[in-house]
Image: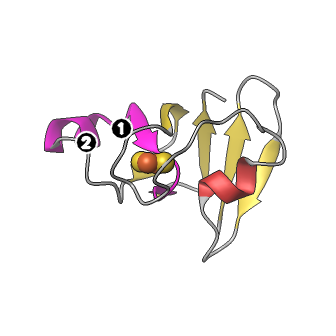
């Protein structure tokens, strides 16, 4: 598991295996917009402020993946113990 910090509220949530970031943050960030929830529409794209995202979407280019400044939180996970997201 890993932690996600929501920069706007300062809330920190734990994302256990088998639970998406989206599901983990829904209670504390109810306005997050989503649609496909499978990593192909781009609706849930979220800025990454700190940490290293583990991308599982089919939208970002190789360059964007490498830069790690944005991610689809419906399917993406984290390679670092904590991600700080612009939520
Ligand atoms: Fe479609 Fe996340 S909701 S990419």
Dot 1 crowding, Cα within 10 Å, few <14, some 14–19, many 20+:
some
Kindly identify which numbered label has been placed on residue 79.
none
Question: x%, y% of residue 12?
Answer: 79, 45
Q: Quadrant of residue 58?
A: bottom left
Question: x%, y% of residue 6?
Answer: 72, 35
The reply to whether dot 2 and dot 1 touch (C-beta < 8 Å) is no
Residue closer to the observer: 3 or 8 = 8
Dot 2 crowding, Cα within 10 Å, few <14, some 14–19, many 20+:
some
74 is within the stretch colored magenta: yes
Residue at image coords 66%, 29%:
87
Q: Which residue occupies the extreme bottom position in the image?
A: 18
Q: Quadrant of residue 85?
A: top right
34 is within the stretch colored magenta: no
> Which residue lies under the disc numbered 1?
68
Q: Is 19 rendered above or below residue 24? A: below
State the separation of the CA atoms marked 2 and 1.
10 Å
Span colored in magenta: 62-77
Kindly identify which numbered label has been placed on residue 60.
2
Residue at image coords 45%, 53%:
36
Q: Is residue 10 left or right of residue 47?
A: right
Element under label 1?
A: loop
Q: Is residue 71 left or right of residue 21?
A: left
Residue closer to the observer: 82 or 75 = 75
């Amino acid at each position: 598991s890993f932690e996600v910090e929501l920069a706007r509220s300062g809330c920190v949530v734990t994302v256990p295996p088998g639970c998406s970031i989206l599901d983990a943050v829904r209670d504390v960030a109810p306005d997050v917009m989503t649609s496909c929830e499978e990593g192909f529409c781009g609706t849930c794209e979220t800025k990454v402020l700190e940490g290293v995202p583990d991308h599982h979407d089919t939208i970002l280019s190789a360059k964007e993946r490498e830069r790690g400044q944005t991610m689809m939180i419906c399917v993406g996970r984290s390679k670092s113990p904590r991600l700080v997201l612009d939520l």
